[in-house]
Image (spheres, rainbow, N blue to C red):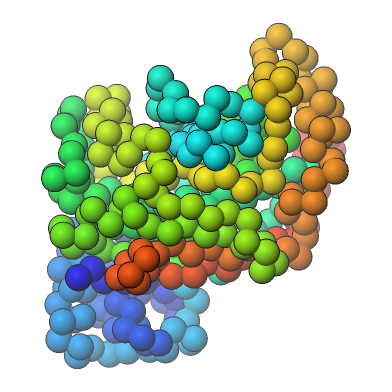
Amino acid sequence: MGIQVVRFEKENKASWGVVAGDKILVLNEAYGTLAEFLEKGAEKARGIMKQGTADFVSLKEVNILSPVTKPARIVCQGANYSTHRAEAGLETGRPPFNMIFSKADSSLCGAYTEIVRPAHVKLLDYEIELGLVIGTDITAPAHVTDKNLHRYVAGLVIVDDVSARDIQLPEGQWLKGKSYRTFGPTGPYLYLLDEEEIPLIHDLEVNLWVNDELRQSANTNQLLFKPAETLTELSEIMDLSKGDLIITGTTGGVALNLSAEIMGKVSSLAVPGQEKLDLLVENQKTSAKYLRDGDVIRCTIKSQDGRIDLGEQINTVIPSQVASLLNS
């Protein structure tokens, strides 16, 4: 059985440990990065979980940090659930290609960190996603299958791919719209998988609430491009390193809801940028689902039998205290 690993801070010191009930069994060694932990600490973590003998601290006494550390590549899949494709004004069937983009690692933050809304962002959206943590360096094309997926994926995390729609769509800048600092709450736990648990990746319940209202609910069996296929394709394009993060796309239920006509206009290179922005904001202004200051987002991903549980992520939206420098 896999284990829940947590990276945490206590008395200004970052440490790693294994979750056991309401306690953390602490690893004495210091691992500066996720890659270092996976290489040197993962087996030790499994060992102390089996033995149950280690120094411990209460989960309530520590500050939970993102288990994914910088530097890290964050590779994202877009429009990978039919329900999300429908609300984004796209064809709902599996498209002919896997949409891939990136997100800056400076967006990474802890599972309970406040999400800072930039002063100029009006259409702030949420996107719960299953994150795959890469467990080995990939430097050449690799044929990844469900049978050998455990060699490439070390574990799973929750990621909220927070998105500024009024940057992402009118500007055609997905990296910009999704990379503001705090736009990548990750964790609380890194679930280290056992080989026999790999099939459960395809049967995880994904849920997100805003102010206790269920907004997103799906199962990872609905992913259009599955993890093994995606990793095979990525391996033919780029290097991936131990500790990098693949986020697999969000399901329906986000604030964004566009007709095909509006999506076509706001993503068109032929329409002037300001016109696209004005059209998008006007079209979306009546939606009550976009995030506002004070909103609380709660995310969970787990298997139906509870064997795999990535924990519960809770983040509050706050306004930026800094005005945009672009218009100063």
For the N terminus, the quadrant is bottom left
Residue 327 quadrant: top right
Considering only vertical position in the picture, is 19 above or below 237?
below
Q: Please provide percent x and percent y for residue 259.
A: 71, 28
* Direction top: furthest residue: 270
Residue closest to the eye, 170 or 203: 203
In this picture, residue 193 sits left or right of residue 178: left
Q: Is residue 49 visible?
A: yes
Q: Residue at x 27, y 34 (%)?
A: 229
Q: Residue at x 43, y 52 (%)?
A: 219
Q: How many marks?
A: 0
Q: Residue at x 21, y 60 (%)?
A: 197
Q: Please provide percent x and percent y for residue 325.
A: 77, 40
Considering only vertical position in the picture, is 128 above or below 314?
above
Q: Residue at x 75, y 43 (%)?
A: 123
Considering only vertical position in the picture, is 226 above or below 10?
above
Q: Please provide percent x and percent y for residue 60.
A: 49, 86
Q: Please provide percent x and percent y for residue 79.
A: 51, 34
In this picture, residue 264 sits left or right of residue 139: right
Q: Is residue 114 visible?
A: no
For the C terminus, the quadrant is top right
In this picture, residue 83 sits left or right of residue 33: right
Residue closest to the eye, 94 or 208: 94
Considering only vertical position in the picture, is 289 above or below 81?
below
